[in-house]
Image (spheres, grey):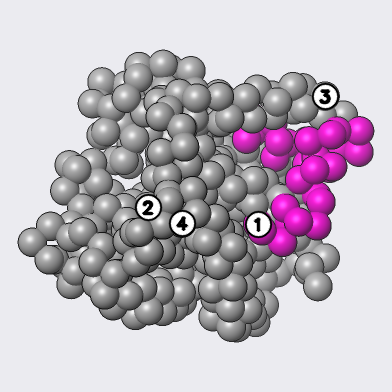
Amino acid sequence: MIPANRDQALDGLRGAAAIMVVYLHFVSTSGMLAAPGGGQLGVVIFFVLSGFLITRILWSRPEQGLRQSWTDFVRRRARRLYPPIIVILAICGPLMALADVPADNGQHLFATAIVLTQSAAPFAAANAMPIEWWGHTWSLSIEWCFYLSWPLAVWLMRRRGLQSQRASVWTGATALALFAGSLFLSPRFFYFLPPANIAAMLVGAALALREVEQGQRPARGRLADVAAIGLVAIVALPSNMPGLWAYRVTHFPFAIVVTVLLISTRHATQSLAQMLLRSRPLVAIGRASYSLYLWHFPLLAIIWFGFSSLAPEVRVIIAVCMLPFPVWLSYRYIELPRLRSIEGARKHQIDTSGARSELGVTP
C-alpha cells in the first residue's frame, strides 16, 4: 500500500526517469541504435527530484543543532542507500568476474572499492573506471556531494531566519551560477562532475522552498503535457548528446524545466502526462527505482559476457526478462525494511508542519 502522504505522480516521474536510463544502457550496449537517444536525461530528472524531496524534508524538520541535524540526516541516508549497494556488490561482483567482464588489469576489487566509497564520478569523468559496468554509480557520488553539503546550507539559512521564499531565490541564483560556470567544462566533466548536476538539484530545492510558503497551486498541466511530449521525443530520437554543446545549452536545461513543470502540476486532473505518471505500473517502477538503477547494468554485463555466443538482441531480451526478479527482491527484502525503520525513527522528530515521508526519496 502506498502511504497517504506520498505524491504518486512523483513516484511515477521517478519510474519514467529510471526507464529512460535502462533504455539508454540496454540499447547502446546492444548496438541496436548507433545513436541511442537521450535516455541520460533520466538522471537529470532524478537530480531535480532528489533536490526537491530532500529539501522538503530538511526544511520541515524541527530546528536542531548543526552537528545533530547533519549527523542524523547523513546517518539516515547511509542506512537508506548502503544495504542494497553492499548486496549487489556481494552478488554481482563475483558473477562479473566469473563471466569474464573486462576489467582494467583485473581490478575487480578496486572497482568494488570505488562503488563502496561512492567515488565513481571523478573516475567516470576521467574515463578511468576499472569496470565500466559499474560506471552508472557515478550519479550516487553526486547525490552524496549534495547530502553532505546541502543540509549545512539549509541549517545556515534557517539559523539566519531566512524565510523560505527568500531562501528559494538565493538557491535558484546559486543554481544558475553553478550552471553558468559549468558551461566551460569539457563534455565529460560537465556530464559527470558535480557543478552542473548540483545545479539541477538546487533547482528542485528552490521549487521545494517556494512551495513551503506558496503551497501547491492548482494547475491544468497542459503546458506540462507539451513539455513531456518534447522530452519523450528527445529520448526516443537517435542522437549522441553528451558530447555536443547542444546538450549543455538545450537538452540539459530543457530536462530541468520539464521536471519542474511536472512536479509543479502533479495534482492536475486534466493532464495526460500526470495521468500516466500516476498509473500503477509507473508508480510501482518508481518505488523500486533505486534497486532498478543499481541492478540493471551489472545484470546486463553478466548476461552480455556470460552468454557471449548469443546474438546481442537475444542477450538484451534475456536481461530484460530477468531484471524484474532481483529488482523486486532487492526492494521487497532490502529496501522496504530499512525504509520502514527510518520512517519510524523520523516520527519522533516530525512536528505538525505536514512533513513528507522520506520513503523512496532517492532514485
Q: Which of marks 4 and 2 is in front?
A: 4
* 78 in relation to 27, above or below: below
Neighbour tally class for label 4: few under 14, some 14-19, many 20 plus, Cα within 10 Å: many
Residue found 59% across the figure and 73% down from its top = 325
> In the image, what residue type sits under mark 4?
Arg
Q: Nearer the viewer, mark 4 or mark 3?
A: 4
Please name the residue that numbered disc 1 is placed on.
286
Tag of residue 222 = 3
How dense is the environment of label 2, judged by Cα within 10 Å: few (below 14), some, or many (20 and up)? many
**What is the distance, in whole Å, between disc 1 and disc 3 at their CAs?**
23 Å
Answer with the quarter of the image where residue 130 lies. Answer: bottom left
Which of marks 1 and 2 precedes in the sequence? 2
Mark before the other along the chain sequence, 4 or 3? 3
Specify the quadrant of the image occupied by residue 301: bottom left
Quick one: SS at disc 4? helix
Instruction: Identify the amino acid type marked 2.
Output: His
Marks 4/2: CA–CA distance:
20 Å
User: Label 1 is placed on what type of residue?
Assistant: Gly
Q: Residue 315 carries which label?
A: 4
Residue numbers of the magenta segment: 257-286
Between tags 4 and 1, which lies in front?
4
Q: Is the magenta region chiefly helix, strand or loop?
A: helix
**Image depth: mark 1 or mark 3 in front:** 1
Q: Which of marks 4 and 1 is nearer the N terminus?
A: 1
Quadrant assignment for the N terminus: bottom right
Which residue is under mark 2?
136
Q: Which of 46 and 288 is in front in this view?
A: 288
Side (left or right) of 222 relative to 171: right
Expressed as whole percent of the image width and height from the top left, the position of residue 35 reads: 43, 28
The CA distance from mark 4 to mark 3 is 40 Å
